[in-house]
């Protein structure tokens, strides 16, 4: 906020419903968001020169509408790599050693439950990574070097050579499902990846797999995951994201014991939030000064502007 105020007049939205945002955005030259914007809000911003995402995922911004209107969209792809990677690795350890159920057992004076919570070591296990971007690549590096894990990687947007260069053995999706003892998701959510883990996929997973999702809730079919966990095909899960956030009271996952839930907070560290804020702010100011941004999701708008 202080950095932006050095070169621009800063206003904070007083409400985030569509009608309020449409009114408040009308005179703005730039907007920075951590909440979803609709196409109508973008169209109401007739003076907009840039839309900035305080974060990585672009599903909060109608990028197509911005592109149509010639508005650059900037984001912070490097800001949370370390934070989310550490979360994913920590979740693997927590699941393998039953941190969640063990904590609840002690709190409920059920010490004897320890006999039914025999964990396993990560060392030498097979890890499957769906999505070999910045976070997936960092998770692969940590798990290979720290735990000597065999790492398999799947990414429909990368070549086999590129996946291998990022530290994983390239594999088809079904191959990863069948072989992985730990499975972690680091993919963007779009129409091609929505419910990439559905009922059919869960029928192919290795029995007793541990699952981590710190990407987007829509990558998983909630009902299918609940069924797979009740059947024992998925031994445990760590979910930082859900299809509905916050979850509805009838979400079937809430009643399953060996799931660790966190409230979409894997990237909420002091360091990541500082990087997000500063990276987004600097790119906003670059565009307002007529300079090219460092991280633009629709660079064709920059060419049009030039």
Image: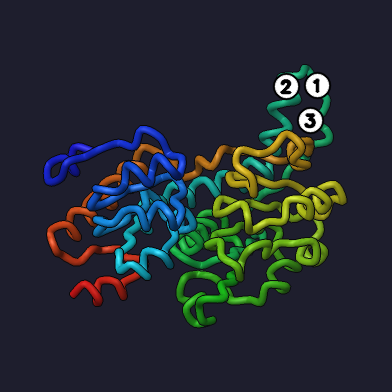
Comparing 255 with 88, the one in front is 255
Q: Read off the residue under disc 3.
A: 114
Q: Position of residue 292 (x, y in %)?
A: 19, 66
For label 2, the residue is 106
In the rendered image, which quarter contains the N terminus? top left
Q: Is residue 12 above or below residue 232?
A: above
The mark lying in front, picked from 3 and 1, is 1
User: Residue 40 appears at what percent x and percent y?
Assistant: 43, 55
Q: Is residue 258 left or right of residue 242?
A: right
Which label was assigned to residue 224?
Answer: none
Q: How far apart are labels 2 and 3 at the CA level?
A: 9 Å
Q: At numbered mark 3, what does the secondary structure look like: helix, strand or loop? A: helix
Q: Residue at x 64, y 49 (%)?
A: 243
Query: Dot 3: few (<14), some (14–19), or many (≥20) neighbours within 10 Å?
Result: some
Relative height, residue 227 to residue 290 (above, below)? above
Label 1 SS = loop
- Note whether residue 131 is visible: yes
Residue 143 left/right relative to 120: left
Q: CA distance from mark 3 to mark 1?
A: 8 Å
51 sits to left or right of 261: left
Give the residue pinned by disc 1.
110
């Amino acid at each position: 906020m202080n950095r932006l105020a050095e070169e621009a007049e800063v206003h904070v939205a007083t409400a985030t419903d569509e009608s309020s945002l449409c009114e408040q955005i009308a005179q703005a030259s730039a907007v920075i968001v951590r909440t979803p914007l609709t196409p109508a809000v973008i169209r109401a911003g007739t003076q907009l020169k840039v839309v900035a995402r305080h974060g990585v995922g672009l599903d909060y911004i109608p990028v197509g509408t911005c592109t149509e209107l010639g508005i650059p969209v900037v984001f912070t792809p490097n800001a949370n790599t370390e934070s989310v990677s550490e979360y994913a690795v920590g979740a693997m350890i927590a699941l393998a050693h039953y941190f969640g159920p063990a904590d609840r057992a002690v709190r409920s004076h059920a010490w004897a439950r320890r006999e039914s919570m025999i964990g396993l070591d990560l060392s030498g296990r097979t890890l499957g990574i769906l999505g070999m971007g910045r976070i997936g690549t960092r998770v692969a590096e940590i798990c290979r070097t720290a735990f000597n894990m065999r790492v398999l990687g799947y990414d429909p947007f990368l070549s086999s050579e590129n996946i291998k260069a990022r530290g994983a053995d390239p594999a088809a999706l079904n191959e990863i499902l069948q072989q992985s003892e730990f499975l972690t998701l680091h993919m963007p959510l779009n129409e091609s990846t929505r419910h990439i883990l559905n009922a059919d996929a869960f029928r192919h997973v290795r029995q007793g797999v541990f699952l981590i999702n710190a990407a987007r809730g829509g990558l998983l079919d909630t009902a299918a995951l609940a069924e797979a966990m009740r059947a024992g095909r998925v031994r445990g899960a760590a979910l930082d994201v859900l299809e509905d956030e916050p979850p509805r009271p009838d979400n079937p996952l809430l009643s399953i014991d060996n799931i660790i839930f966190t409230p979409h907070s894997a990237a909420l560290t002091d360091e990541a939030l500082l990087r997000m804020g500063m990276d987004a702010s600097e790119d906003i100011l670059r565009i307002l000064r007529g300079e090219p941004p460092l991280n633009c999701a629709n660079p064709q708008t920059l060419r049009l502007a030039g």
